[in-house]
Amino acid sequence: MGFDWPEAAQVRAKVLEELNEVDAAVTAGDATVAEEIGDLLFAVVNWSRHLGADGEEALRAANAKFERRFVHMEETARARGLDVEKLSAAEWDTLWRAAKLNGG
């Protein structure tokens, strides 16, 4: 029907606008945070379409990558004798960076 932006850069601007609206809702303690996040996700999926990527496929791949990295983190922690439930944020970050370097 033609109701679309002609260029991906315009959709990117919309993504940033929606992100700012999420931030504003969070700052205000507004009950519309979930609605604003929905708008942001919609804009990101639209942007991905403009860039020739399947948004759902990209999200599934990102989720799988996160799972691989997290499993690597848990395995590394256990191999080092660390209790994963007692790790600090800094320790988790170190394990995350190692998982990324190891192809996770």
Image (cartoon, grey):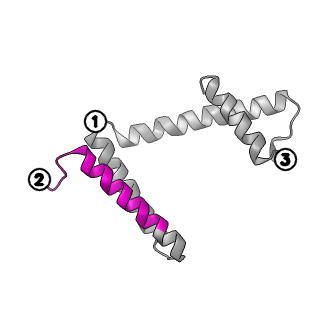
Is label 2 in a helix, a strand or a loop?
Answer: loop
Dominant secondary-structure state across the stretch colored magenta: helix
The amino acid on which the numbered mark 3 sits, given as a three-letter code, is Lys
Is label 1 in a helix, a strand or a loop?
Answer: loop
In the image, residue 32 lies in the stretch drawn in magenta? no
Dots 2, 3 in contact, CB < 8 A: no
Near mark 1 (Cα within 10 A), the count class, few <14, some 14-19 or many ≥20, is few
Furthest-top residue in this view: 102
The magenta stretch is: 1-23
Give me the residue at 44% from left, 61% from top: 37
Where residue 56 appears, as percent x and y from the top left, is 39, 42
Give me the residue at 29% from left, 38% from top: 51
Q: Earlier in the sequence, mark 2 or mark 1?
A: 2
Location of the N terminus by quadrant is: bottom left
For disc 2, the marked residue is: 2
Q: CA distance from mark 2 to mark 3?
A: 54 Å
The amino acid on which the numbered mark 2 sits, given as a three-letter code, is Gly
Where residue 95 appears, as percent x and y from the top left, is 73, 34
Q: Earlier in the sequence, mark 3 or mark 1?
A: 1
The amino acid on which the numbered mark 1 sits, given as a three-letter code, is Gly
Q: Is residue 10 left or right of residue 85?
A: left
Which disc number belongs to residue 52?
Answer: 1
Near mark 3 (Cα within 10 A), the count class, few <14, some 14-19 or many ≥20, is few
Q: Earlier in the sequence, mark 2 or mark 3?
A: 2
For disc 3, the marked residue is: 86
Furthest-right residue in this view: 81
Q: Is residue 22 left or right of residue 69?
A: left
Dots 2, 1 in contact, CB < 8 A: no
